Image (tube, helix red, strand yellow):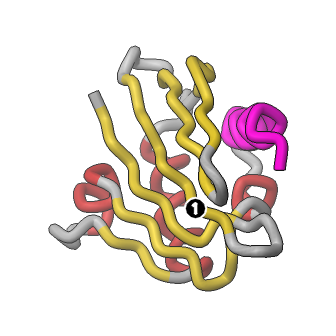
Amino acid sequence: MDAKEFARDWIDAWNSHDLDRILSHYATDVVLISPAAAKLTGDPSGTVRGKDALRSYFQKGLEFFPNLKFTLVDVMQGLSSVVLYYENQRGTKTGEFMEFDTDGAVVRVVANYS
């Protein structure tokens, strides 16, 4: 996997606000853990399980932030993972650890915010 190519495609998908394009990066059984998810879903664990739940969470996020825009700052690659470090339209920086399955789909995300 080319981490930089993945990062560019992921950022472009989010900036397009095309939910299907965004979700194309994720496996059916994905698990996401995020402080933003805790706020938007009301679940203090911030855990979103499965692609259907992820669709609902991302849809809420896109509705809540209609001017959402990400700018890639850096990307780091591991053996079966990447960390995307990016900035949003409000200047908040985010680091997302993403782990991939053998098909190249994201199965686990842990988001951290500045």
Query: In the shown orientation, is residue 108 left or right of residue 14?
Result: left
Residue under the image location 44 percent in, 66 percent down: 32
The image shows residue 86, relative to residue 107, as above or below, that is: above
Q: Is residue 73 visible?
A: yes
Tell me the residue that label 1 is attached to. Answer: 99
Q: Amino acid at mark 1?
A: Glu
Can you tell which quarter of the image residue 59 is in? bottom right
Magenta segment main secondary structure: helix
Give x and y (percent) for residue 77. Answer: 64, 41
- How far from the left and from the top, in percent, is residue 44? 16, 68
Nearer to the camera, 92 or 109: 109
Q: For the residue labelled by badge 1, is the local secondary structure a helix, a strand or a loop?
A: strand
In the image, is residue 95 part of the stretch drawn in magenta?
Answer: no
Quarter of the image for the C terminus: give it: top left
Residues shaded magenta: 1-15
Residue shown at 59%/71% (left/top)? 107
* Of residues 20 and 10, the one drawn nearer to the viewer in this rendering: 10
